Amino acid sequence: MKKTKKLNSPLLVLVILSVILLIKLGVFRTLVYGEVSWLRLVAIDFPVFMLLPVLLFVVLRRISPLVALIYNLFVSALLVSIVWYERYFQTVPSYFDLQQGDQAGSVMETVSLLYAPLDFLFFADIVVYIALFVLYWKRPLAMKNRKKISVAAIVLVVLSVATTVVALQKPILDMTLFAKEQGFVQTQLVQAAQQNSASAQMHLISDEELAKLKGNEFVPYTEHDRFGIAKDRHLFVIQVESLQNFAINQSIDGQELTPNLNELLGDSLYFDRMFQQIGAGNTSDAEWLLHMSLLTRGLDPTVNYLNGSPLPSLVNMLNERDYYTTTYHADKLEYWNRAELYPSLGFDYAYSSDEIPNEDMIGLWPSDRTMFEFAEGEIQEQIASGKKIYANLMTVTSHTPFEVREQDKYLKLPEEYVDTYTGNYLQSIRYADEAVGEFIDFLKAEGIYEDSLIVVNGDHSGLHGRPMTKEDNELMADLLGHTYSLKDRFLLPFIVAAPGALESEVNSNFGGQVDMMPTIMNLMGIEPQAPMVGHNMLQYENNLLAVRYYLPGGSYITGDHMYLGENARYPERYYDFETMERIEPEPEIIEQTQERALKILNHSDALLSNFLDDDEETETGEES
């Protein structure tokens, strides 16, 4: 009987919940930050996680074991979700990401690759908790020492507020490092506060100053190399899911990974040093970079800022030249807020899973072959109308986890690659290449090819994060002949074909995804109507890219060097970009370059803010 009374003690419920939270937060810190730091855990993390149930119990005047159990399950689910997110994206999620729950469907197939046995510890306590609940905690327990619980609540409130106030005084340079030092919950609050005050840091700069920040001398647009040589041609941009640059001209056991793209290089400019610049919006951010030549917002998908009002995009500039503009993607328009993105960019029509036949499924989507075959029928009708057309075609079959059907595997892989993450990636890229090749053959058969500018680019990397095991990295090293590096991961192909106007050429000027639009505009003879952050890669040799996502805050790449800022697991690092060998950091050069990169970031943010403000003023004027 005495034992039962002890087990029915309201204080025991709180003690058990506290111990469980401490253990889980310790495991969480170990998995995400690489260390526990019990002082930070007890003083920063624990108070904010324990505060809600304690306050609830004080208000209810009862301690409910059921509420404690439900809260415990919620915390477990939250922490393990953050762990999985960090394993894949190599950064902790921001509160923007936590709002994107409806976007999770397309990456659910990857969860099995992110799970580790230690993750079970987040839920191991549930069995004991339920046993105690069934045997002893069948109803809420009245609090006999409400004053003591109230004092505990006050202490938790004071600690939570104090740590948040301290965190608010510091800038977030790297999400994971900041969360490690200031607490995950506090980081979300600080991010929200800093986001609301970010406009104070925005400053516009001139085209001349922008060129100088990148190490170039500004040249008027109409004087650029090969300006207008593809004027008045049809434009086709094929954005290939997860296509990395190393796949181009790469072979395995004598088999080309991208034979059709390799053949296209015969009529193409091939930019082989274009660096990934997407933010949390992933593929939608790649669309943004291509069509706006503005940097992404980083932690928040850029599409979340849009309301459908028109922007000075590549699409709208083509619309003004009487092009019929369309985009094709075998997914829902609601995914990544494309229902707002496409009207803002100005597409005449956006073909989605509502029109593209929901058949020949590979993974969660219709196959690339299905998408291209559908687009071919639409393109024939559009060209028959006599208009020039722009078609933006986005593949999806080579999306992680890169699983294609046996009949779609064109490579005979060495045994050690079969059924590995790396091997699956190579098979999916080979399939995507085949689908692209069939579309190119269609353009040739219809007599469209010779009158077109055809662009192929990758949207972002595919081989990264926890799914890349030690075995996968060894397989990549065998394939490439060197260690799989960040350079291999982040370089994306940018291929521009203009049959009859361009000869086969490899251009190794360093650039980013933000530079695609100015380069395309130059070839098509289009002068910009609004400022851009990117530049024509045919004209300028030097560049400076700041990266807001997938690399630690403060990181930048110049084409000669790559600087990685400090994060939760590693100190700052400095690389020779050509060899990817570590070199000694030069603090003065790093600081000066970071200042230049920050000016470019702030300039991009200011441009977007001005574009959106102009749209709001236009709408207000129309309504009045």
Image: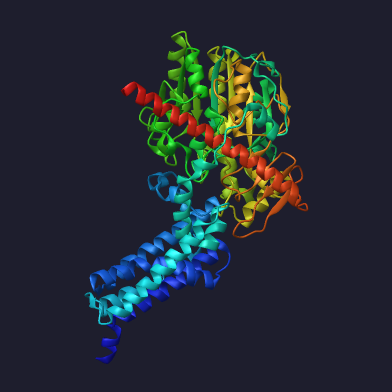
Give the percent coordinates (x, y) of residue 421.
57, 49
Q: Residue at x 37, y 77 (%)?
A: 16
Closer to the camera, 292 or 475? 292
Image position of 228 (left or right of 17): right
Q: Residue at x 46, y 61 (%)?
A: 164
521 shown above or below 555: above
Q: Residue at x 52, y 57 (%)?
A: 169
Q: Residue at x 57, y 39 (%)?
A: 602
Image position of 11 (left or right of 117): left
Which quarter of the figure has residue 614?
top left
Closer to the camera, 373 or 614? 614
Residue 478 visible: no
Give the percent coordinates (x, y) of residue 107.
45, 47
On the rendered image, what quadrant is the N terminus found in?
A: bottom left
Residue 318 visible: yes
Give the percent coordinates (x, y) of residue 198.
50, 44
172 shown above or below 250: below
